Image (spheres, grey):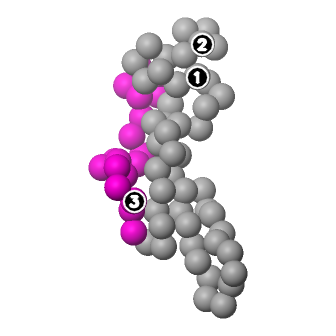
Amino acid sequence: MQGGRCPECDLSPDEPGRIAVIDDGIPVSGFPDDPGERCERCGRHLWCVLNLVYEEGGEGARADA
């Protein structure tokens, strides 16, 4: 591998993983069964979970990763 993409998960060392979103406490469709899952070959996290939180009285959303 040496800095290239993993042949198992196809992630490069500088990628955060595939995006998975929780919108106001509810996982969106396609959310992984195990968001903490790692590639068996390289050990990288397969998912980067974004938790969208809407604050009461606020106009925007805040994303917590």
Residue in the image at 58% along x and 22% along y: 12
Residue 56: horizontal and vertical position, in percent?
A: 61, 88
Quadrant where the C terminus sits is: bottom right
The quadrant holding residue 38 is top left
Horizontal side, residue 65 vs residue 60: left or right: left
Please name the residue that numbered disc 2 is placed on.
Answer: 4
Q: What is the x, y in percent for residue 20?
A: 46, 50
Determine the residue positioned at 63% across, 14% down: 3
| Residue drawn at x 48%, y 67% as measured from the top left | 23
Instruction: Give 33 or 38, whichever is nearer the viewer.
Output: 33
Residue at far front of view? 59
Mark 3 vs mark 1, CA separation in Å: 25 Å
For residue 54, which numbered disc appears in the image?
none
Tell me residue 30's x, y (percent): 34, 49
The part of the chain drawn in magenta is 26-43
Q: Mark 1 points at which residue?
A: 12
Residue type (three-letter) at the residue carrying disc 2: Gly
Q: Is residue 43 above or below residue 7?
A: below
Q: Is residue 28 magenta?
A: yes
Asked if the residues shown at circle 1 and circle 2 are in contact, with their CB atoms under 8 angstroms apart, the answer is yes
- Horizontal side of 26 relative to 61 (left or right) equals left
Instruction: Determine the CA span between mark 1 and mark 2.
Output: 6 Å
Closer to the camera: disc 3 or disc 2? 3
Kind of element beneath mark 1? loop
